[in-house]
Amino acid sequence: GARLLYCANDEEVEDARVASLGHGAGVLVNVVDNLDASQFITPAIVDRDPVTVAIGTEGAAPVLARRIKADLEARLDASLGTLARIGKAFRPKAESLPHGRPRREFWQRYYGSTGAEALAHGGEPAVRVALDAMLWEHMSGAQARKSGYVWLVGAGPGDPELLTLKAQRIIGECPVCLYAGSLVPPEVVACAPEGALVRDTAAMTLEETHAEILAARDRG
């Protein structure tokens, strides 16, 4: 009753023999790391159920797909699936928010920081409490009256690959990114999201930089 056959013997002759048996049985055959001998390909999978990420290279570079998978495995915390499941159950309540930007900002806050922090400190019950509190804040306008917050991120030796995962996440989500000129390589600055306000403070005095930071914080 099999429909698919994977040949993964790491030995060309044995893989060919097994593939021949599969062809004779009328099933589709995949020979690992051998695109020409395969009738189908399988993407590398990052599983954070119910979130699933598939990485495919059309069979051209399986090793590259596995490297990308490893990078994503490191970046996507194991808690992501739990947060997605709780968030899905909360969606009917969140629909009481106006459609568009208010609802989008609510979920960005949940998946960007609040959900993971609540899960780490109090488990799933704390996440549900945090969602209820967030919804009240957004519905009442309390969130709009809050000021933002400031993260100070060290660029380390200048290699973006040596940034911590938390530093990469913070830079990748910030609406305002201030950096100290040549002390921060362009590759690190490029981690800021599209649409973020990015400013070089090298020409500013310390007082001007502080004022710029506080102004950005007060704008939320």
Image (tube, rainbow, N blue to C red):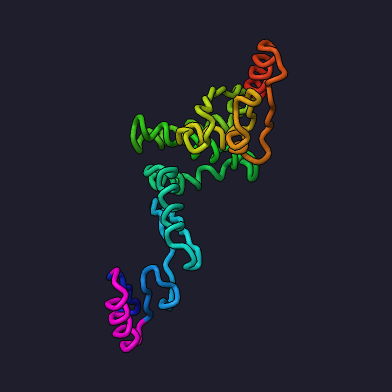
Q: Residue furthest right?
A: 203
What secondary structure is the stretch in magenta mostly built from? Answer: helix
User: Image point 36% across, 69% down: which residue?
Assistant: 32
**How far from the left and from the top, in percent, is residue 49?**
39, 53
Which image quadrant is residue 36 in? bottom left
Asked whether, in this view, residue 175 is left or right of residue 39, the answer is right
Give the answer, above or below, for where 14 lies relative to 96.
below
Asked whether, in this view, residue 137 is left or right of residue 16, the answer is right
Query: Over which residues does the magenta segment extend?
Result: 10-27
**How far from the left and from the top, in percent, is residue 169?**
51, 36
In which quadrant will I find the C terminus?
top right
Nearest the camera: 118 or 90? 118
Q: Residue 137: within the magenta?
A: no
Nearest the camera: 56 or 49? 56
Which image quadrant is residue 7 in? bottom left
Which image quadrant is residue 12 in? bottom left
Asked whether, in this view, residue 8 is left or right of residue 114, the answer is left
**How far from the left and from the top, in percent, is residue 46?**
41, 54
Give the answer, above or below, for where 26 lies relative to 8.
below
Residue 114 visible from this viewpoint: no
Q: Residue furthest bottom?
A: 24
User: Image point 59% across, 42% down: which residue?
Assistant: 104
Residue 201 visible from this viewpoint: yes
**How far from the left and from the top, in percent, is residue 114?**
47, 33
In which quadrant will I find the N terminus?
bottom left
